[in-house]
Amino acid sequence: MAKAAARKTAPAASPSVERRPALAGRSTSATSVKVEVLPPAERMSLRAPEASVAALSKALGVTLPNKPKTSASKGGRTALWLGPDEWLVIDEAGSDPLADCAKVSVLHSAVGISHRNIAIAVTGAGAAATINAGCPQDLSLDVFPVGAASRTILGKTEIVLLRTAADTFRVECWRSFSDYVFTFLSEGSRDAAV
């Protein structure tokens, strides 16, 4: 009887929910290229008129770029120019760019997209050839230098592409297309190795 009473008074275990990143831990390697899913990061889609850029740049701690195909990075935070009034802000340092923008009263629209996107790194001598298996952009260093960023396509899906080093790219895509993008890049890496 005492055991039955103890069972009735013991608190029930709380249900727990764990969000697992899409494709977590997946990677593939070929002779001259490696394709791997990057760790989760904070992301924000930012829209703002020219008059708001200085205040937002100050709040974010990184100068928002104002030219096509450019990016700016500082302290683990990167801002990629996507259009005349549009940026993708990625924070890999564990800070929240949305919270930083919330402190600013200038006109802007900031939307958290951390769980919508995933990032895939493509590294090695064959990285550009791997991406060019499905992306029409000229990825030569003189046309697409380190720091270059662009919203483009890979196969049948939209991606945001950032060159982080001479032989390293960050491919951002929606998580719903992540398996397709990862598989496409994996196949491209095998072709680039030939």
Image: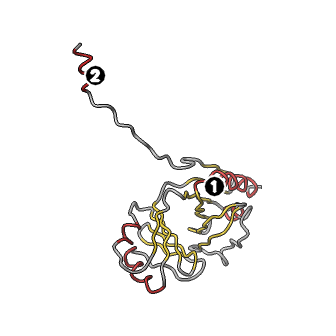
Q: Image quadrant for the N terminus?
A: top left
**Residue 125 appears left or right of 8:** right
Query: Residue at position x 47%, y 47% from top?
Result: 19
Q: Identify which residue is drawn at 48% across, 55% down.
A: 40
Q: How far across and how far down the image is residue 59, in percent?
A: 37, 75
Q: Provide the secondary structure element on which disc 2 rests.
A: helix
For mark 1, what is the residue?
A: 177
Position of 122 relative to 56 (above/below):
above
**Circle 1 residues within 10 Å: few <14, some 14–19, many ≥20:** some
User: On the image, which quarter does residue 120 sit in?
Assistant: bottom right
Q: What's the CA distance linking mark 2 and mark 1?
A: 47 Å
Who comes first in sequence, dot 2 or dot 1?
2
Q: Residue at point 55% right, 49% down?
A: 22
Residue sitting at the far top: 1
Looking at the rendered structure, the kind of residue marked 2 is Arg
Q: Residue 187: where, in percent of width, then height?
A: 72, 52
Please, is residue 146 above or below residue 1 in the view? Answer: below
* Mark 2, residue position: 7
Q: Is residue 86 above or below residue 13?
A: below
Amino acid type of disc 1? Phe
Side of 43 where 159 appears, left or right: right
Horizontal and vertical percent position of residue 174? 59, 58
Q: How many badges with numbers are in the image?
A: 2
The residue most toward the left is: 2
Q: Quadrant of residue 93?
A: bottom left
Residue 36 has which mark? none
Quadrant where the C terminus sits is bottom right
Residue placed most toward the observer, 9 or 104: 9
**Of residues 143 and 117, the one drawn nearer to the viewer in this rendering:** 117
Q: Position of residue 139 (x, y in %)?
A: 68, 71
Q: Secondary structure at mark 1?
A: helix
